[in-house]
């Protein structure tokens, strides 16, 4: 997914990950392969969380971040995607959803905001991506 993010120019300004080891390993791999140069922000509240926990963390971000990636767990990630876009997708391990939000500042994000699902990728769709 990191290579896809680099190719699609979706490298985030910030990656926020659950404190769970598997999520952190996923975030590290994505950071490495995408060319992300920042530090990973750990969110203990993402573990077994519903969409409200993700939205709370995101709404507290500074506005210097335009593109943010969250790495978390199901069913919370599927619920978050549906809450933000009204699209119900099965978010398998290592899936990537690109959501654009109609906000100018992160503090505007709440459970009433509806964005657009711009892209959705799952690992089996990436057979044509090579690791160089």
Image (cartoon, grey):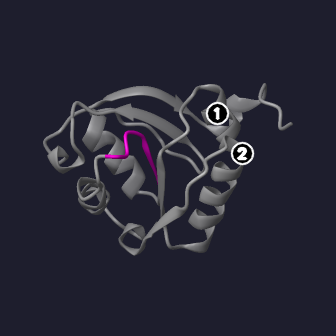
Give percent across and percent down for residue 96: 53, 40
Q: Nearer the viewer, residue 74 or 60?
A: 60
Q: Are marks 2 and 1 in contact (CB under 8 Å)?
A: yes
- SS class of the residue under badge 1? helix
Quarter of the picture containing the C terminus is: top right
Residue 108: say if magenta.
no
Query: Residue at position x 70%, y 51% from top?
Result: 32
Q: Using the rendered view, name the quadrant where residue 88 is placed.
A: top left
Q: Looking at this view, name the residue that lies furthest to the front.
A: 64
Residue for point 29% across, 53% down: 62
Relative image position of residue 9 (x, y in whole percent): 57, 28
Whether residue 38 can be seen here: yes
Q: How packed is label 2: few (under 14 Cα within 10 Å), some, or many (20 or more)?
A: some
Residue 33 tag number = 2
Is the N terminus in the top left, top right, bottom left or bottom right quadrant?
top right
Q: Is residue 100 left or right of residue 8?
A: left
Query: Does 51 appear above or below 63?
Result: below
- Tally the marks: 2
Real-space Cα separation, disc 2 to disc 1, in angstroms: 8 Å
Q: Which mark is residue 6?
A: 1
How crowded pointer 1 is (Cα within 10 Å; few <14, some 14-19, many 20+) is rated as some
Q: Which mark is residue 58?
A: none
Q: Residue at x 61, y 73 (%)?
A: 21
Q: Position of residue 10 (x, y in %)?
A: 53, 33
Q: Specify the segment rendered in magenta.
A: 64-70
Q: Is residue 1 visible?
A: no
Using the rendered view, name the quadrant where residue 5 is placed: top right
* Drawn side of residue 88 relative to residue 5, left or right: left
User: In terms of sequence position, does the residue under pointer 2 or pointer 1 come before the other?
Assistant: 1
Residue visible at 24% across and 60% down in the picture: 56
């Amino acid at each position: 997914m990191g290579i896809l993010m680099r190719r699609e120019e979706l490298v985030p300004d910030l990656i926020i990950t659950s404190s769970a080891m598997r999520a952190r390993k996923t975030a590290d791999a994505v950071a490495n392969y995408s060319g992300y140069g920042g530090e990973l922000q750990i969110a203990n509240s993402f573990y077994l969380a519903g969409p409200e926990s993700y939205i709370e963390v995101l709404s507290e971000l500074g506005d210097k971040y335009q593109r943010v990636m969250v790495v978390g767990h199901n069913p919370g990630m599927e619920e978050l995607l549906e809450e933000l876009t009204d699209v119900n997708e099965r978010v398998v391990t290592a899936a990537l959803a690109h959501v654009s939000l109609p906000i100018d500042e992160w503090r505007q994000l709440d459970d009433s905001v509806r964005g657009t699902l711009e892209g959705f990728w799952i690992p089996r769709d990436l057979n044509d991506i090579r690791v160089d």
